[in-house]
């Protein structure tokens, strides 16, 4: 199975005008591929998912599963599975009845139902919970039941709508491999919606970043991290977020350099590569991992604000003429409050963005 | 002479507390007496010899006059018909009210349509009119349509006055059920109707009980509509029926009337007692 979303737009009528929730989105999810749709709230990721599920209908554009056009089909006829944010187990049914419901609707005989439920329950380690009511289970167990409910149906597309956003960090880490095992087991295209970039990075084959209803970039986790197409992706992916500085491009003997904070950083690029940007303003983006703290004589002038020790590393906050800047420092780093430092950007990790469009130019 | 506030202050905390307790329990006892005494009187008379009720006045039943004879009225004359009519009409009203309020409440909770809020407010307009104001036009309409003296006619009228409350309750209750549960069932292949039955209805049990109890109270205790819409002697229900027993002229057997009244009081008490937990749950709006 392959899911193909092409030129999909979804417009909502609101009291104060029209809201374009999804704007001309084209995306393909291959068979067995785990694709994560990530972005801030209101970016259109959930609307996209609901259109694929059949709970919403695109204003224009098409959605196909293999060669079947499902754009206007009701959810009952799509053979998809969806894991909801609020889990949505039926509170008046036992765990077994919850898992059985879809099979019952499909008219699967009872002994077959029993068999596949027990198989799924074993895989999810909830075999001893089958006769309990959902309310008596913990959040993580409920999530496993919901996974099992989808697993037994063997859907042709598996959708996830921020299923872990109500769980605590430890439980999330515990469930991630479970989700991956289950989706591998089914082997169908997976569309996973989340606002948590860490979830997106750790679980996906491919990450698609959305903002303002538009697709910003889609690619493997490493690629979107290393080579963001624009400053939004650069800032959204990666923890702590990428820092940006306004700078000016200069050319010295054919080699490009950027001037910022009274310093010049020469780049691994010739002036020709930055054609059109020489002698113009750009935004420089660097990840906090690639900024080092030095004496006040070097780099960008910075005043130390606070340290957040995490044990293995420390996040230090500085105030500069470009605003607040976070730097990942050594675990033992302990800055003087109000002390003057200099921030040095790692030359090879410096990225350049167009100040108007935000597109990455180097 | 000291000012009243000072004398109040001079009362010790303990005395004031005791006074408060006396006032509290005293007023509670007074109201309980006012409410319960007529019921006591009804029960007492139901078990007292018909002659004795009229000729001798007694606060307490005496062994000589206690009898079960009055209850034989249940098998005499029109009384069994009254009781059966009441039961049939009440059950009919409950079934109709629950069925319609479930569907209407679901529709209001899940579908968007124009002027929904105005429609909901309009529903409540029915409570602005007294039963007699509604009953007389209904009499004219029912007599034209042949629903007069038919139990179904009364069921429709009683359902109509129970409905606004029941629909509101069901609407608000269904709103508390997460829509994702239904969506999950649709995705699993269940039709909207099947989802309604399998997922929504089982979860509205407390609201169903609350609506049923409300309809029960309206139908079981109704006097005005039954009096107007079931004018014939042998088709009417208990409340107007007992009125007619009294009005039959000449000799009124209070013992008989109290015996019937007593028996008709038992079902509401049992209902209220056994279902009160459900009733409270039905009225509370869930947080999840």
Image (cartoon, rainbow, N blue to C red):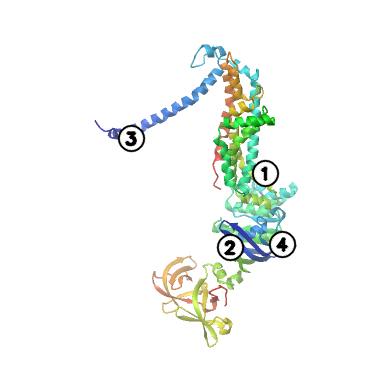
| Disc 1: which residue | B197
| Disc 4: which residue | A64
The percent position of residue A265, horizontal first and vertical second, equals 50, 81
Mark 1 to mark 4: distance in Å? Answer: 31 Å
Mark 2 to mark 4: distance in Å? Answer: 22 Å
Q: Residue furthest bottom?
A: A253
Is disc 3 on the same chain as disc 4?
no
Question: In front: B161, or A244?
Answer: B161
| Disc 2: which residue | A43
- Disc 3 packing (10 Å; few <14; some 14–19; many ≥20): few
Residue A9 figure quarter? bottom right
Q: Label 4 near label 2: C-beta < 8 Å?
A: no
Using the image, name the chain to which the residue with label 3 belongs: B
The percent position of residue B143, horizontal first and vertical second, equals 67, 29
- Helix, strand or loop under label 3: helix
Question: In front: B224, or A321?
Answer: B224
Q: Which mark is residue B13?
A: 3
Mark 1 to mark 3: distance in Å? Answer: 60 Å
């Amino acid at each position: 199975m392959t899911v193909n979303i092409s030129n999909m737009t979804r417009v909502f009528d609101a009291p104060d005008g029209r809201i374009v929730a999804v704007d001309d989105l084209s995306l393909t999810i291959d068979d067995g591929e785990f694709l994560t749709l990530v972005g801030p709230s209101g970016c259109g990721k959930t609307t996209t998912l609901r259109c694929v599920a059949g709970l919403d209908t695109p204003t224009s554009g098409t959605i196909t599963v293999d060669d079947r056009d499902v754009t206007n089909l009701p959810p009952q006829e799509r053979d998809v599975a969806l894991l909801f944010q609020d889990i949505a187990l039926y509170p008046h049914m036992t765990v077994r009845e919850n898992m059985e419901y879809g099979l019952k609707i499909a008219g699967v005989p009872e002994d077959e139902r029993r068999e596949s439920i027990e198989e799924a329950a074993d895989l999810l380690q909830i075999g001893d919970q089958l006769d309990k009511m959902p309310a008596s289970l913990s959040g993580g167990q409920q999530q496993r039941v919901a996974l099992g409910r989808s697993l037994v149906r063997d859907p042709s597309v598996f959708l996830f709508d921020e299923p872990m956003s109500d769980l605590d960090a430890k439980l999330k880490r515990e469930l991630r491999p479970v989700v991956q095992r289950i989706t591998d087991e089914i082997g169908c295209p997976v569309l996973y919606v989340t606002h948590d970039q860490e979830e997106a990075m750790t679980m996906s084959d491919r990450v698609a970043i959305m903002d303002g209803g538009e697709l910003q970039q889609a690619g493997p986790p490493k690629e979107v991290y290393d080579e963001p197409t624009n400053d939004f992706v650069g800032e959204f992916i990666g923890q702590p977020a990428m820092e940006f500085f306004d700078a000016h491009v200069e050319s010295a003997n054919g080699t490009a350099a950027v001037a910022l904070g009274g310093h010049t950083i020469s780049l691994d690029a010739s002036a020709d590569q930055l054609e059109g940007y020489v002698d113009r303003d750009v935004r420089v983006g660097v990840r906090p991992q690639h900024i080092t703290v030095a004496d006040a004589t070097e780099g960008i002038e910075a005043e130390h604000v606070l340290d957040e020790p995490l044990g293995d590393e420390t996040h230090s906050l500085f105030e500069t003429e470009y605003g607040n800047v976070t730097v990942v420092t050594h675990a033992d780093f302990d800055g003087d409050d109000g002390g003057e430092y200099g921030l040095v950007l790692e030359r090879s990790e410096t990225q350049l963005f167009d100040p108007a469009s935000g597109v990455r130019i180097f | 002479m000291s000012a009243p506030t000072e004398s109040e202050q001079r009362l010790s905390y303990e005395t004031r507390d005791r006074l408060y307790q006396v006032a509290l329990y005293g007023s509670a006892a007074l109201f309980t007496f006012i409410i319960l005494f007529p019921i006591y009187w009804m029960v007492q008379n139901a078990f007292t010899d018909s002659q004795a009720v009229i000729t001798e006045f007694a606060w307490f039943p005496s062994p000589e006059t206690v009898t079960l004879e009055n209850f034989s009225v249940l098998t005499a004359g029109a009384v069994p018909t009254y009781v059966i009519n009441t039961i049939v009409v009440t059950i009919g009203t409950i079934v109709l009210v629950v069925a319609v309020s479930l569907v209407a409440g679901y529709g209001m909770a899940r579908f968007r349509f124009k002027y929904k809020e105005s429609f909901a407010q309009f529903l409540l307009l029915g409570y602005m009119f007294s039963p007699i104001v509604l009953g007389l036009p209904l009499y004219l309409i029912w007599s034209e349509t042949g629903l007069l003296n038919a139990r179904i006619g009364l069921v429709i009228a009683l359902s109509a006055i129970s409905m606004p409350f029941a629909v509101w309750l069901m609407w608000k209750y269904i709103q508390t059920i997460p829509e994702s549960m239904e969506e999950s069932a649709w995705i699993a292949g269940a039709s909207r109707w099947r989802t309604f039955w399998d997922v929504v209805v089982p979860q509205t049990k407390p609201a169903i009980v609350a609506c049923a109890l409300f309809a029960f109270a309206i139908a079981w205790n109704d006097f005005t509509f039954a009096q107007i819409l079931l004018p014939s002697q042998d088709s009417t229900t208990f409340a107007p029926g007992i009125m007619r027993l009294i009005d039959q002229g000449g000799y009124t057997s209070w013992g008989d009337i109290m015996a019937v009244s007593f028996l008709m009081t038992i079902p509401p008490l049992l209902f209220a007692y056994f279902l009160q937990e459900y009733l409270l749950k039905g009225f509370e709006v869930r947080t999840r």
